[in-house]
Image (cartoon, rainbow, N blue to C red):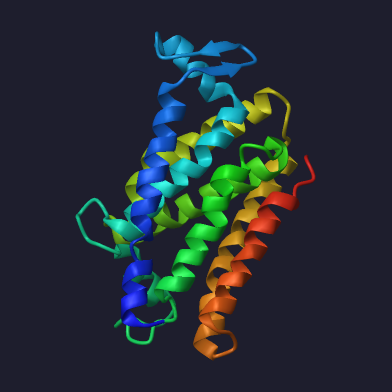
Amino acid sequence: MSPEVDNIIKQWPWISLTVGTALAAQLFLGEWKTSRGVSDIRSFESWSLRLRDPRWLCYICGPMYMIHQFEEWGYDIKGVPYSFHRSLCENLGYPDLKNCPATPLPVWAVNGITMWVGAWSLRWINPSAGGANYYGMVVINGLSHIIRAMKDSEYNAGLASTLLNFMPAAYFFYSAMLRDRKITAAGIARSLVLGVVGHLVWVVPYILIDKGYVSEVTACGIQLLNTVMLNLVGTPM
């Protein structure tokens, strides 16, 4: 892609922030019907009912991930733009960023196709299957940020939203699912395995670009496999 097109594509985190924040505000502040009664903002006891509702936690997963994307690829809490790009390129063997295969188009595809589609698909798919799979992605992504922060003894782009959003939401989701007997330990294990596989599918296209095996556009298409896997590989357990 030309530098001009790349610069346009690199604006996608602002879409994530805008849409993700709007959806999250609606879900946090609006009325929500649960099996235990109506959840609203009139009292914390009433509002917190949604934290025990797997369906609400599926709805919030997508917007939560979109806000996380902005911390990684928009501006981190230090005000550094496109901060996660440097660490990704370093992991791919390009510490100076020169010729790094993580170019704007496949970066957008990794984040957009898999997670933007997920933001909407989670409204309809089975929480025991697809919902758990996406939370498997949340946990594995969150652990990668936490482990790196512990290893380097410093903040990394995405850590704040991991600690404030990802890990608490994952705790509430799996707790609610276990409480309602909608998932077993085997189901949780499956979701975490798919979380690992999903992250490998994220990284592999960059390696293929680096080796010259595929183009940027083809690498974007590979991300469709992630979306299909997370939504369809879902035998409830």
Where is residue 33 shown, x and y percent of the image?
58, 17
Question: 119 above or below 81?
Answer: above
Residue 97: x, y in percent?
32, 81
Q: Is residue 222 above or below residue 169?
A: below
Residue 161 found in image quarter? top left
Left or right, 45 with respect to 76, comes to right
Q: Is residue 126 above or below residue 98?
A: above
65 relative position to 135: left or right: left
Q: Is 92 left, or right, of 149 in this rendering? A: right
- Quarter the N terminus occupies: bottom left
Residue drawn at (45%, 10%) of the image: 45
Residue extending farthest bottom: 212
Frontmost residue, 157 versus 25: 25
At x 71%, y 37%, the residue is 126
Q: Is residue 101 visible?
A: yes
x and y percentages locating residue 42 in the rendered image: 40, 9
Q: Which residue is painted at 40% across and 70% down in the image?
A: 88
* Residue 60 percent coordinates (x, y): 50, 36
Q: Is residue 156 visible?
A: no
Quadrant where the C terminus lies? top right
- Tally of numbered tags: 0
